[in-house]
Amino acid sequence: MKPADVCLAVLVAVIWGLAFVLSRIALNELSPALMTALRFSIAAAPCLVVRRPKVSWPVLISISFTLFLGQFLAQSYGMALGVPVGLTSVIVQSQALFTIGLAAILFGERPSWRQALGIAIAAAGLLMICGTVGYDFSVSAFAVLMISPISFAAGNLLLRQARGVPMFDLSVWLCLIAAVPLLALALAGDGVQPTWQALSHMSLAVLSCLLGIGLVSTCLAYWLWNRLLHDYPAAQVVPFALLVPFVGSAASSIVFHETFGPLRLAGMLTVIFGIAVMVLSKPRQAAAEAVRA
């Protein structure tokens, strides 16, 4: 990958890590469905001036319902049901393993043995982090949360069907498509009056969190992420997402005083080392081709 694109991938990981904290704060006042609906409604605002990309409606809907609706609704419900923010960031980013595995099976995009080693190292780090989190949530909450990385991975690969279109235009329209059914779900599940009550009494702090996860984490970060997936193979891009648990856990420890000991710190360092192995092990010839592209 080009050095500038490596920096963009790291930036996206930092933004997404901080978004977990902002989402948890917003869930103190809003239901999971309403919070997720508002996130995508805000991110879809550029649709007022951006034309729909030349992608069929079935493809747009399938990408939106997996990459956005499925991933973030499950994530929101998981946190609302008691899964700690740090652990949530770890579980969601296991999508990297699902994405690379599905890409190898469906597209024959097999990683090199060095990249496979890096994936194994990073996965071991994730397991170390998981082992340090308190068991203060139900099995059903964990099952709901696991829908998130699976949807994320499916959406990553479905993006292949939207090649050749402006990534920003695609991102904001995917947000719009996700926002409509989510708003309907919020109204049906929460009720019209409770929904209006939550909106009319929203605090400035929660509004700021929604603007952050809507405009920055969703609109900007996903545009950058989709562009990277458009320009490079999945095995090169998705490992950077393994940085998200590090950022999310660190931010959670500061904001929510989530504590972790030496094992969790070791797990974080192991994840970063695994990413380094995957990125630095790219063959020179392939790297040159990526730069020329």
Image (cartoon, helix red, strand yellow):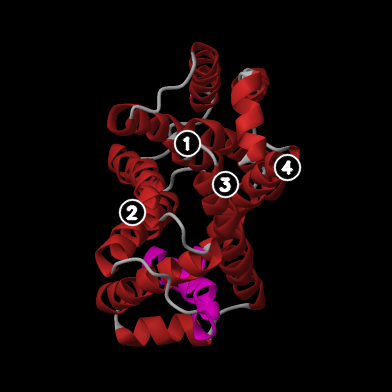
Question: Residue 196: horizontal and vertical position, in percent?
Answer: 41, 87
| 226 magenta-colored | no
Residue at the disc numbered 3: 228
Q: Where does the image place residue 168, in percent across and percent down from the top left?
A: 55, 65
| Of the image marks 2 and 4, the number of the one nearer the N terminus | 4
Quadrant housing the C terminus: top right
Q: Which of marks 1 and 3 is nearer the N terminus?
A: 3
First in sequence, mark 1 or 2: give its number: 2
Mark 4 sits on what residue? 7
Does the image show residue 169? Answer: yes
- Amino acid carrying label 4: it is Cys
Cα–Cα gap, marks 4 and 1: 17 Å
Quarter location, residue 270: top right
Let me know if residue 37 is in the magenta part: yes
Magenta residues (range): 27-50
Secondary structure found at label 1: helix
In the picture, the disc for residue 66 is 2
Q: Where does the image place residue 222, in percent across and percent down from the top left?
A: 54, 56
Q: What is the number of callouts on the image?
A: 4
Residue at image point 37% right, 58% down: 73
Res. 30 in view: no
Q: Residue 91 carries which label?
A: none
Q: Which of marks 3 and 2 is nearer the N terminus?
A: 2
> Callout 1, which amino acid?
Ala
Is the stretch drawn in magenta largely helix, strand or loop?
helix
Q: Report the amino acid beneath label 2.
A: Thr
Q: Which amino acid does label 3 sit on?
A: Leu
Q: Height in image: 253 above or below 287?
A: below
Q: Give the residue displayed 55% in from the left and 22% down from the top.
A: 122
